Amino acid sequence: MSQKPDYQPGAFQWSFLLPQYWGIWIGIVFLMILALLPWALQYRLAVFLGETAFKHLKSRRKTAVRNLEVCFPEWSAAQVQDNTRQVFIDQMIGIFETLNAWYCPYWFKGRFSIEGLEHLQKAQAEGQGVLLLGTHSTLLDAGGYLCDQFFKLGVVYRPQNNPLLDMLIYRCRATIYEHQIDHDDMRGLIRQLKNGHAIWYSPDQDFGLKQGVMAPFFGVPAATVTAHRRLMKISKAAAVPLYFYRDGDLKDPRYHVRLEPALDHFPSEDEVADAIRINKIIENQLRIAPTQYMWFHRRFKTRPEGFDEIY
């Protein structure tokens, strides 16, 4: 579990040069080298790593299989297995795409487009901050980079336990995001929204009912966070659904950023109705590219009383 660091995010410490951190430095150099590889090699390596992860990460594979079984009951057992395998491959491809966004962003030139930018611009022109309601996509920070080509955005993040790793990721993300807000810094998040900024926030994971309510997700009861409702009530921000995905031939992919109209009458006085509404939006987005979502998270770990466990 991540925890809040006791140092300034992104700050270098001389202790990072101690032997205990050498392995991480070597790993970072290796990742930078991978980012310099031609896409044809990156893609092939990602497929190999994805297949390997699918084979050996049995717990994660089991979770992904169960998620896809309950969310896509129309799929056959063979389709579930094939799509689960692709989830792992897409995750590995997403890692290379993120490395490219951090170290070789020119690779994306001429490969991306955006739809619905006017919805964000309209809200900001009216003096509102914008909470970009997104998902945990396998594109990772590559999706943030794509957005940054059209508008400035911040992101809510969880600090890494390892301080050197946290510093390195923070600095890489600083080239993409205008602001990086600790998930515990609600005052900072509200301040940014009140100042008219756009912040990417993903309300698509199970944090239990202390932070949310039960609402159907793909027809299955799921603990759904409601913190964004309070944020919006205080900041008067607009809620604009955000989705980005990859399509086309994986040997020559294209990337798309999709912004939907700001939600009207949101939040309402009914937190369950709001949760149902958000989950439905996410469902519709995920159906565009189902395997580009992190299905290996236990989305349904919280179960209503009287319901069988899913995992």
Image (spheres, rainbow, N blue to C red):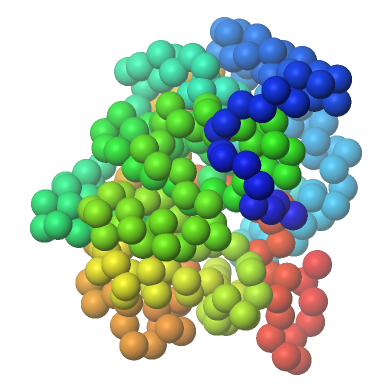
Nearer to us in this view, 52 or 97: 97
Q: Quadrant of the C terminus?
A: bottom right
Nearer to us in this view, 280 or 240: 240
Position of 217 relative to 33 (above/below): below
Residue 24: % across, % down: 76, 23
Residue 185: % across, % down: 49, 58
**Number of numbered discs:** 0
**Which residue is most to the left?**
126
Identify which residue is drawn at 55% across, 81% down.
213
Q: Is residue 157 visible?
A: yes
In the drawing, does residue 110 fall left or right of residue 70? left
Position of 52 relative to 161 (above/below): above
In the drawing, does residue 246 fall left or right of residue 304? left
**Which residue is most to the bottom?**
306
Q: Is residue 87 visible?
A: no
Identify which residue is drawn at 32% across, 18% down.
110
Residue 148: % across, % down: 34, 33
Q: Quadrant of residue 145?
A: top left
Q: Quadrant of residue 177?
A: top left
In the drawing, does residue 308 fall left or right of residue 156? right
Position of 240 relative to 165 (above/below): below
